[in-house]
Image (cartoon, helix red, strand yellow):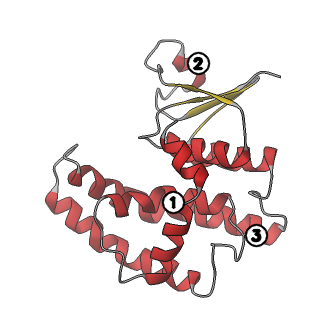
Amino acid sequence: MSKIRIFGSPQSRAFRALWAAKELGIDYELVTDYKTPDFAKVNPNAKIPALQDGDLTLFESMAINLYLAQKFGKGLWPASIADQGRTYQWSFWAMTEVEKPALTILMDTFGMKKDAEGAEAGKKALEKPFDILDQHLAGRDYVLGKDFTIVDINLASVIGWAKAGKVDLSRWPNLSAWLDRCQGRPAASAARKG
């Protein structure tokens, strides 16, 4: 069986795939030289992350994570069909409701793209989704209840950008405590190193 290859870097959206792989104990090869003509065969969009697992190639970080969790399990993929549906729901929600404003804030904070006005609008745009998630997390350790699953990786990897962008999360104590639990996992620390 060939080793799984993950294309990207820990400082990109590939972080969430690396985190999932670390949680699952997958032996993988991190490919950081992805600016090659051959990479278009892996991802015709020429963006990272991408994954090769034998003859299968995937792009889009959420799709990669859902695939890894389903294939390798180990508790990251929820057992019930209802929780699987919630996993899709919250993963897609992170991409549609949180990612763009969080990324705008992060890029402004670190000077990758100065947009103070956009960053302030991003902070405002995050209030409602963060209210929703904070309410959902009341009385729960993780998104689906007491167990850490792939949906926690998918959400925390996006919401972590807001924290890195210096968004004050004190208004959302449930969300903040959950994010600290997720980001404090050994696999998350290992994924930051690749």
Residue visible at 51% across and 40% down in the picture: 14
Task: Please tell me which residue lies in front, 139 or 42.
Answer: 139
Query: Count the marks: how many?
Result: 3
Give me the disc on residue 19: none
Between the residue at mark 1 and the residue at mark 2, the CA separation in whole angstroms equals 33 Å
Label 2 Cα neighbours within 10 Å, binned few <14 / some 14-19 / many ≥20:
few
Please say if 17 is above or below 163: above
Q: Nearer the viewer, mark 1 or mark 3?
A: 1
Q: Residue at x 20, y 67 (%)?
A: 120
Mark 2, secondary structure of its residue: helix
Q: Are marks 1 and 3 in contact (CB under 8 Å)?
A: no
At label 1, which amino acid type do we have?
A: Gln
Instruction: Report the residue marked by disc 1.
Output: 183
> For mark 1, does the 10 Å Cα neighbourhood hold few (<14), some (14 to 19), or many (20 or more) residues?
some
Relative to 94, does residue 7 appear above or below in the rendering? above
Which is in the foreground here, disc 1 or disc 2? 1
The CA distance from mark 3 to mark 2 is 34 Å
User: Mark 2 or mark 1, which is nearer the start of the sequence?
Assistant: 2
Q: Is residue 170 left or right of residue 82?
A: left
- Quadrant showing the N terminus: top right
Judged from this view, the residue extending furthest toward the front is 186
Instruction: Give the residue type at disc 3.
Output: Asp
Q: Are marks 1 and 2 in contact (CB under 8 Å)?
A: no
- Seen at 36% across and 84% down, the residue is 171
Residue 93: give x, y in percent of width and height.
53, 65
Badge 3 or badge 2: first in the primary sequence: 2
Q: Residue at x 52, y 86 (%)?
A: 135
What mark, if any, has residue 83 been given in the picture? Answer: 3
Q: Which x, y percent locates residue 3?
A: 73, 24
Q: Give SS at disc 1.
A: helix
Q: Which residue is mark 2?
A: 41
